[in-house]
C-alpha cells in the first residue's frame, strides 16, 4: 500500500528535518556537551519522522514495525537530555559508569516489553489502529508499563532541569542567557508532552514530536547567532575585583604582583603602593604565620591562620601553584577566606554539643530510673507483676527452644491480715521488706523474685527440677519462719504457704503455669498453712481421694 500524506504527517516530517539540521549544527561545534546535544537532536528527529509514518496509510507490516523504531527515539530523548544537562551545567561528575549503566536498564526493559507486547499487553492494551478519513488520529489503550516509563522519563527530565537551574545559579550573568535558551528550547516539547498525556482528549494528536522542530530552531539560532556553547572567559575585573575572598598573586619568586580590594581590607591598607607590589610574601605574612616559605613547596596547600586583632580573626588560606603551557611554575595564587563567623559557629556548636551530651546523659539516667520504677515494686524493690508477665513469657519461650524446665514458686504470708489489723500497716510493710530481702539474697543467679500481689510473692527458677525446687522452697520456708522482725517493742514472726508448678509439665504457657502454682498454694493453705506443696503432689493426692 502506498503512503498517503496527511497534513499532520507533513508537519511532523518538517519538524524532523529541522531537528536533523540542528543535530548537524551541534555536531560541528567543539564544545562540552556538543556531541550529546547532536545525539539528542538526532533522537528527536527519529521520533518525529517515525511518528509521521504512523499517520500515513501504510501496510500492516510497516505499522507494526514503525512503533518499535519510534520508541528508539522516545526512550533515548530523556536519557540524552539528562546527560546533556549535566555536561552543560558542569555536573559531569554525576555521570559515573554505574549511573550511565543504570540509565540503560529501563529503556532496554521497555524495548523488550514493546517487542513482546502481544503476549502480555503491558505497553499497549490494544494494537495501533488508523481510522478512515483524511486526518486519521490514533486510538491507543495504554498498559501499566507505559505509565511507568512515562514517570521514569519525567523523572529524568526533572533532574536535568534541576541541574540546569543549579548551574545557572552559580554562573556569571553572561552565561545565564545561554542557560535560559537551553531551558526554553527543552521545555517546549516537554510542556507539549505534559499536555498530550494529561490534558488532551483520549483520541488526539501528540504535540510532542511536533514541538521538536521549534526546539531545533531555537538551538540552531542560538548556536549560529549567539555563539552558544562557546566558553566565555571571565574578565579579571569581574572575577578578582568582586570576590569577597582576599587574593594575592605571586610570581615564581614569591613576590606580590597583584592584590584585590578584599585583600587590602584584610591587610588594613588603603591602597596598593609601589613599594608594596613587589614585596616578598614572607615580609607581608610573617606577622601572621611562621615559615611562610614552607607553603610555597610547589603543590597546592591549605592551612588556617589566626590574626590577633581585636577581636581575633580566622583566615582559611589556599595556595595554588600556577603553571604555563609547558608546565613550568609561573607563580602562585593565594586565596584568603575569612572564616571567623564559621569558627565562632563551630565554637557555639561544640558548646551546644557538650550541653546536649550532658542532657543526654541526664535523660539516660532518668530513663533508667523510670525503667526501674516501671518494673520494680516501690516498697520491697522486688520486680513487679508487669515485669513477671513480660519476662516469664520470654523465659518460657527460651526453655521451649532449649528443652529445659522452668519452675514457678508462689508463696503467701499466713495470717497477714491479722498482723495489719493488730500492729498496723507499717508493721506489715516491715515484714514484707524483710521477706523480700531474704528472697533476693537466697536466689540463684538467673532466678528472679517478684511481688505478685499484696502479700504474695513469686520466684521463677529456670532449668531446675521439681524436686530441687521443692527443696529450695522448703529451705526458704524454714528460713523465713525462724525470722524475728523487730517492730517498735514487738517481736513479730510469720510463716509462709508455698505452691510450686513446673513448665511444661503443669502448664503450656504463663497463665496456665501461674494458675497451677496458685492451686498448689491453695492446697498448702488448705492443708494447714506453713507448708510446701507441688502441683504434681496435689494432683496425686486428688487422685487418691477419688
Image (cartoon, helix red, strand yellow):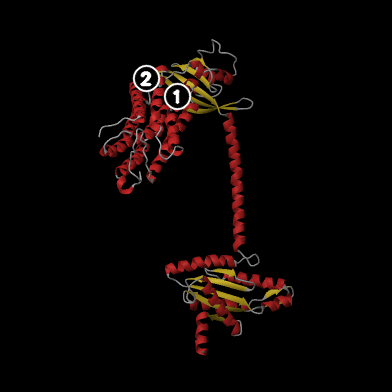
Q: Position of residue 100 (x, y in %)?
A: 36, 36
Residue 250, numbered label: none
Left or right: 65 as drawn, with respect to 529: left
Residue 340 visible in this rendered orientation of the protein: yes
Quadrant containing the N terminus in the rendered view: top left
The image quarter containing residue 454 is bottom right
**In front of the other: 346 or 198:** 198
Residue 327, numbered label: 2
Residue 210 to residue 260: above or below: below
Q: Secondary structure at mark 2?
A: loop
Q: Position of residue 197 (x, y in %)?
A: 43, 38
Tell me if mark 1 has few (under 14), some (14-19) or many (20+) residues whose alpha carbon lies within 10 angstroms of its own. some
Mark 2 vs mark 1: in front? 1
**In front of the other: 405 or 447:** 405
Residue 181, numbered label: 1
Q: Report the label total.
A: 2
Residue 253 to residue 457: above or below: above
Amino acid at each position: 500500500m502506498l503512503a498517503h500524506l496527511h497534513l499532520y504527517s507533513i508537519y511532523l516530517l518538517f519538524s524532523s528535518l529541522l531537528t536533523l539540521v540542528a543535530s548537524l549544527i551541534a555536531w560541528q561545534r567543539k564544545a562540552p556537551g556538543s556531541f550529546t546535544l547532536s545525539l539528542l537532536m538526532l533522537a528527536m528527529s527519529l521520533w518525529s519522522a517515525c511518528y509521521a509514518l504512523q499517520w500515513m496509510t501504510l501496510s500492516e507490516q510497516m505499522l507494526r514495525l514503525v512503533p518499535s523504531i519510534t520508541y528508539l527515539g522516545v526512550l533515548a530523548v530523556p536519557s540524552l537530555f539528562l546527560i546533556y544537562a549535566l555536561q552543560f551545567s558542569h555536573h559531569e561528575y554525576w555521570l559515573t559508569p554505574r549511573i550511565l549503566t543504570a540509565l540503560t536498564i529501563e529503556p532496554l526493559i521497555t524495548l523488550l516489553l514493546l517487542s513482546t507486547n502481544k503476549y502480555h499487553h503491558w505497553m499497549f492494551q490494544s494494537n495501533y489502529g488508523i481510522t478512515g478519513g483524511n486526518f486519521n488520529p490514533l486510538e491507543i489503550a495504554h498498559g501499566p508499563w507505559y505509565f511507568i516509563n512515562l514517570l521514569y522519563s519525567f523523572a529524568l527530565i526533572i533532574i536535568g532541569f534541576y541541574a540546569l537551574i543549579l548551574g545557572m545559579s552559580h554562573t556569571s550573568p553572561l552565561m545565564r542567557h545561554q542557560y535560559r535558551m537551553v531551558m526554553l528550547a527543552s521545555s517546549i516539547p516537554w510542556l507539549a508532552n505534559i499536555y498530550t498525556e494529561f490534558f488532551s482528549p483520549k483520541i488526539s494528536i501528540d504535540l510532542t514530536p511536533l514541538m521538536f522542530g521549534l526546539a531545533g530552531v531555537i538551538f540552531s539560532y542560538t548556536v549560529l547567532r549567539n555563539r552558544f556553547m562557546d566558553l566565555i572567559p571571565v574578565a579579571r575585573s569581574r572575577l578578582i575585583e568582586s570576590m569577597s575572598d582576599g587574593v594575592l598573586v605571586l610570581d615564581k619568586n614569591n613576590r606580590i604582583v597583584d592584590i584585590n580590594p578584599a585583600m587590602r581590607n584584610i591587610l588594613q591598607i588603603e591602597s596598593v603602593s609601589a613599594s608594596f607590589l613587589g614585596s616578598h610574601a614572607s615580609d607581608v605574612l610573617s606577622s601572621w604565620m611562621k615559615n611562610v616559605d614552607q607553603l610555597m613547596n610547589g603543590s597546592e596547600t591549605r592551612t588556617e591562620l589566626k590574626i590577633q586583632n581585636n577581636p581575633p580573626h580566622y583566615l582559611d588560606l589556599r595556595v595554588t601553584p600556577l603553571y604555563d603551557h609547558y608546565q613550568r611554575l609561573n607563580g602562585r595564587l593565594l586565596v584568603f577566606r575569612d572564616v571567623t563567623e564559621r569558627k565562632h559557629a563551630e565554637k557555639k556548636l561544640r558548646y551546644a554539643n557538650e550541653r546536649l551530651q550532658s542532657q543526654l546523659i541526664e535523660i539516660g539516667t532518668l530513663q533508667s530510673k523510670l525503667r526501674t520504677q516501671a518494673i520494680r515494686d516501690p516498697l520491697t524493690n522486688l520486680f513487679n507483676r508487669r515485669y513477671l508477665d513480660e519476662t516469664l513469657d520470654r523465659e518460657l519461650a527460651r526453655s521451649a527452644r532449649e528443652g529445659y524446665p522452668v519452675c514457678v514458686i508462689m508463696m503467701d504470708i499466713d495470717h497477714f491480715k491479722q498482723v495489719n489489723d493488730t500492729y498496723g500497716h507499717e508493721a506489715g510493710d516491715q515484714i514484707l521488706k524483710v521477706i523480700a530481702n531474704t528472697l533476693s539474697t537466697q536466689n540463684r543467679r538467673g532466678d528472679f523474685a517478684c511481688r505478685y500481689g499484696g502479700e504474695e510473692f513469686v520466684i521463677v527458677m529456670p532449668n531446675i527440677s521439681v524436686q530441687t525446687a521443692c527443696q529450695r522452697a522448703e529451705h526458704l520456708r524454714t528460713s523465713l519462719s525462724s525470722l524475728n522482725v523487730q517492730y517498735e517493742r514487738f517481736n513479730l514472726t510469720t510463716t509462709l504457704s508455698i505452691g510450686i508448678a513446673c513448665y511444661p509439665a503443669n502448664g503450656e504457657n504463663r497463665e496456665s503455669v501461674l494458675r497451677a502454682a496458685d492451686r498448689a498454694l491453695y492446697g498448702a493453705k488448705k492443708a494447714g498453712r506453713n507448708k510446701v506443696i507441688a502441683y504434681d503432689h496435689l494432683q496425686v493426692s486428688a487422685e487418691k481421694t477419688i
